[in-house]
Amino acid sequence: MKIGQDQYRSIWVEDGQVKIIDQTLLPHKFFIVSLRTLAEAATAIRDMWVRGAPLIGATAAYGMAIAMREDASDAGLTLAHDMLIATRPTAVNMRWALEDMTALLRPLVPSGRAEAAMVRAAAIADEDVAINGAIGDHGLSVIRAIAERKGGPVNILTHCNAGWLATVDWGTATAPIYKAQAAGIPLHVWIDETRPRNQGAHLTAWEMAGNGISHTLIVDNAGGHLMQHGRVDMVIVGTDRTTARGDVCNKIGTYLKALAAHDNGVPFYVALPSPTIDWRVQDGVREIPIEERSSDEVSFVHGKLADGSISRLRISPEATPAANPAFDVTPARLITGLITERGIATASAAGLAALFPEHSAVTP
Ligand code: MRU
């Protein structure tokens, strides 16, 4: 995607160094960071300098490649895997990427591992771009159909940031939006703020503004009201892990949007890259581990002060404890369709197995 006149991905290699954008500083500051060590790669994921399921996967792959420069022994491989997998538990793309990298590297002699790892990490990043581009094409057909039926701007609600910042490029939920904009379809995007981290306000709003897409920021609680008044034509969100039967785990609050959409007959779509499918689990509510993040994310907000400095402010009494589950699960029955790189599936075991028959063997 473009930032000003320059084309960027959210992770890239320059002069042999892995570069990322520190997303904790957006939208106020655009700051590029070099990841030089395994420890830095792990910190970047844990502290959410990078975030979003596909980007977490790509960063973990590069983290493994960086680790092989430090110690390419079998012990180094295990250490890198274990350190990275422990950073964030919910998005399954990291497990997918680390298993892929480990399977490739383990049989190689240690002297060949660093180079092979860098090549494979770059391929994983490229694959993510291709997958999201295809999701964009399939999602575009949904937006186009609504535009033709409606004859006016298509109002799309998206929750959290499933944009290009959350992937290597395009985004998942935003790929159809970017493609619809390029196709000249009139649209408007409602952006959820998504407390606790304000990712709609900080990240999706920054993306939409940067790409000239008509958008409005709303608080998390406004979505249901807008749907009741016919001001949302479709919802499209991302996912951190989708089960083999189509339950979707995504940023906290997604479930409430799905309930409101269901109650109001608003189509609710999930943009789903196949590495985000966990074929080993069925019941998302019971089986997906939900990350519990620091209570400080609830008790404090980050923002820019009038003097331009970035600061954090406490918003609750010091004695008040806060809980911070970062994700929730939307049951398949509330989902209109899963937009994958191979087409749109119903949110069901049969729907996913029809598009990904190579995995149906592990689907009970
Ligand atoms: O906690 P985050 O910022 O990593 O969570 C991001 C989300 O929940 C996204 O919706 C999801 O990863 C899909 S990203 C294309």
Image: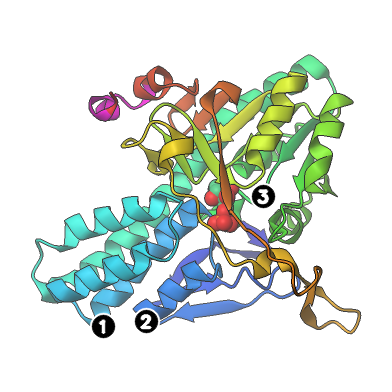
Amino acid on which disc 1 is placed: Glu
Left or right of residue 348: residue 30 = right
Tell me, yes or no, whether the highlighted magenta stretch contains residue 335: no
Most extreme residue toward the front, as rendered?
Answer: 319
For mark 1, what is the residue?
A: 70
For mark 2, what is the residue?
A: 37
Queried on whether the Cβ of the residue with tag 3 lies below 8 angstroms from ligand 1, the answer reads yes
* Residue 69, x across and y down, in percent: 26, 80
Asked if disc 3 and disc 2 are in contact, CB closer than 8 Å, the reply is no
Q: CA distance from mark 3 to mark 1?
A: 35 Å
The disc at residue 160 is 3
Q: Secondary structure at mark 3?
A: loop
Query: Would you place residue 318 above or below residue 292 in this image?
Result: below
Q: Earlier in the sequence, mark 2 or mark 1?
A: 2
* Residue 363, x across and y down, in percent: 29, 26
Asked if disc 2 and disc 1 are in contact, CB closer than 8 Å, the reply is yes
